Image (spheres, helix red, strand yellow):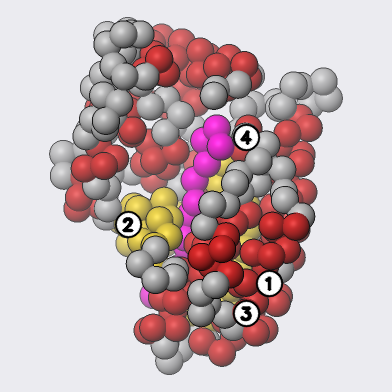
Amino acid sequence: MMSKKEKEILEELKKNLQRNLPKAEFWQVGETETDQCVYYLKTLKDNLKKDLNTPEKIGFSKKDTNRNRWGVIPMAALRSSAALIYNILGDGTHCEINVDDLKCLKEHTLISGGYQLQYEWKYKTINRAKANIDAYLNIDNCHLFIEMKMLEPLTKTHPFDSYSSYIGSNCPKVFKDTFKHYESNKPEYFDACQMIKHLLAIYNYFNQNRPKETQNVVLLNCHWEPLNCRVEGHPLKETYTTFDNFAKEFEIMRDCFQEKLFAKLNVNLVLAHCTHCDLKKMAGKDNDKYLERYEIR
């Protein structure tokens, strides 16, 4: 069920979009199978900076871009993280990025330049299960995996229904131990188990390919964050502060994963998190007028 705060945010985002795109049409209650349809655009292109003519070429599937069983298009939602990262990184198979503008990477070995870009990167975790990471960027021996969050960090808890499957699998012990840690110490707002699954998929990928030269890998959790929400008295200040604290706790575990697993694969691993504003700057979109639709206070 949608919280009051989520509804308030979606109303502001809706006003922003309609201000710049008056002809954009939203579904009305009764026109689809969900009352939340009022925050879904009828036409996907109205939620995107550039229309998706061939979505499959850059990684998006029909599941993202076609109407689902509730009669709405997932990527046409105001809260769509897939739409947000697409609007920031662009509609091509390459993206120019400046890693020096990503302050969360205090110590990194990525290089700036034109990265190959793939949305919805998928790779196996256990059995037939796969992780689905929102964007994968690669240049030479540098790999940037980005998990994008829109309103997900406003949800206090993130149940991990597949816990028993992962604990009973043959994945490395350090992953099982980390799952167990978060099962006993459930974080608030930060979806740690999803990030562990993503990390497991990345580990499996490099374990399968066994690179001969050192590979520099960053798993980045990027979240949308309203302007000025860190000021004293803002209703979301505590939420995002708590999110940060648990994200930092997760990132501290990097040393254990690096020593026990990734070093043996010739992979230098970095775990980090940032806001969508940081990602905009990295992609050279800091002053992009279109992206102002996401700025609310």
- Dot label at residue 166: none
Q: CA distance from mark 4 to mark 2?
A: 28 Å
- Whichever of labels 1 and 4 marks the residue nearer the N terminus, that label is 4
In this rendering, the label closer to the viewer, 1 or 2: 1
Give, as a single range, the part of the protein colored magenta.
139-152
Q: Residues within 10 Å of mark 2 (few under 14, many from 20)?
A: many
- Dot label at residue 155: 4
Q: Is residue 151 magenta?
A: yes
Residue for badge 1: 177
Q: Is residue 182 visible?
A: yes
Q: CA distance from mark 1 to mark 2?
A: 31 Å
In this rendering, the label closer to the viewer, 1 or 4: 1
Q: Is residue 114 magenta?
A: no
Q: Quadrant of residue 100?
A: bottom right
Under mark 3, the amino acid is Lys
Does 294 sit left or right of 33 as displayed? right
Under mark 2, the amino acid is Gln
Q: Secondary structure at mark 2?
A: strand
Q: CA distance from mark 2 to mark 3?
A: 30 Å
Q: Quadrant of residue 137?
A: bottom left
Residue for badge 2: 118
Q: Secondary structure at mark 3?
A: helix
Disc 2 and disc 3 in contact, CB within 8 angstroms = no
- Whichever of labels 4 and 2 marks the residue nearer the N terminus, that label is 2
The residue shown at (65%, 77%) is: 174
